[in-house]
Amino acid sequence: MKKYLIVILLALVLPLSACNEQKKEQKNNPSMETTVKKDFMELAAGRYSVRHFASTPVEQEKVDLILEAGKLAPTAVNSQPQMIYVLRSEDAIAKANKVSPCMYGAPQAFLFCYDDNRVCRRGENGNFGEIDVTIVITHMMLEAYNLGLGTCPVGAFNADEAKRLFELPDNIHPVLMMPFGYPADDAKPSDRHTTYRKMDEMVEYK
Ligand SMILES: Cc1cc2nc3c(=O)[nH]c(=O)nc-3n(C[C@H](O)[C@H](O)[C@H](O)COP(=O)(O)O)c2cc1C
């Protein structure tokens, strides 16, 4: 009996330690890490702009994870100039629908801005705010999709009106809105989702 117990225990423990060894080995060997990149490609290819959302609100734990993914994004000189408003009160959603025709029925949305007091300057008059925020948004879109949610990045919104209605300070500059939530049953990718230019049109090796 004792013998059997030991055999069962070993059968349970050995694969776990083999798995840990494999992870350690992957960490020390960058070429091995390439074998797991397919998961990312599936994520990148599967995400699409959802244009019909269910009315079910997203759980706070999922919102937290999406925000955490955004926090991990790189920004110029690590300035982290992003300011993210989570719009979800009845009042905020009514205002969001006023500033954009592209809420697509979502019961919540992010309004992405950058803070002019934190942003890294670029040349005489420029800054990296929009680039930084766009990278943050990309992290968040992919994590949302990873959690079974849909998103739609929206440039079609009135930034001045958003500033006014949401009472944003002068130093806060809106960049994009993003309705997010559970896709409605009939949500599907548009044709554009799989319309790609040829690689050799947009990539040139020098
Ligand atoms: C900067 C930016 C602005 C966009 N603005 C809008 C918008 O205002 N309304 C909308 O429905 N989709 C908008 N989109 C979504 C694009 O139309 C969509 O990403 C593109 O057609 C590819 O389709 P896919 O996201 O389904 O792969 C925007 C996307 C980006 C990156």
Image (cartoon, helix red, strand yellow):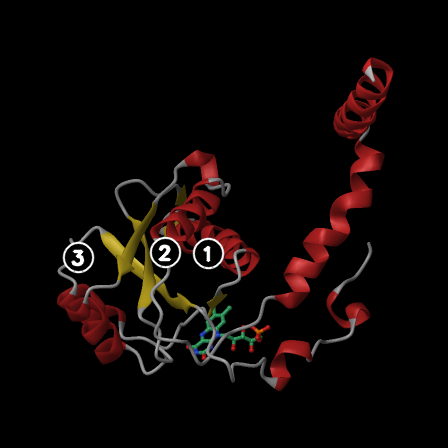
Along the polypeptide, which appears first: circle 3 or circle 1? 1
Of 191 and 25, the residue lying toward us: 25
The answer to whether marks 3 and 2 mark residues whose Cβ atoms lie closer than 8 Å is no
- In the image, residue 29 above or below residue 185: above
Q: Quadrant of the N terminus?
A: top right
**Residue 57 placed where, x, y %?**
33, 65
Q: Quadrant of the C terminus?
A: bottom right
Residue 59 image label: 2
Q: How many marks?
A: 3
Of 5 and 93, the residue lying toward us: 5
**Residue 77 placed where, x, y %?**
46, 34
Q: Residues within 10 Å of mark 3 (few under 14, many from 20)?
A: some
Residue 168 image label: 3
Find the distance from the CA under tag 3 to the CA under tag 1: 19 Å
The amino acid type found where label 3 is placed reads Leu
Name, please, the residue furthest toward the top. 2
Along the polypeptide, which appears first: circle 3 or circle 2? 2
Q: Give the structural element (helix, strand or loop) at label 3.
A: loop
Q: Residues within 10 Å of mark 1 (few under 14, many from 20)?
A: many
Of 37 and 164, the residue lying toward us: 37
Disc nearest the viewer among 3 and 2: 2
Residue at horizontal 48 percent and vertical 45 percent from the top: 69
Residue at horizontal 62 percent and vertical 77 percent from the top: 193
**Residue 31 placed where, x, y %?**
84, 35
**Within 8 Å: ligand 1 and the Cβ of disc 3?**
no
The amino acid type found where label 2 is placed reads Glu
The residue labelled by disc 1 is: 137
- In the visual, does 205 lie left or right of 130? right
- In the image, residue 88 above or below residue 73: below
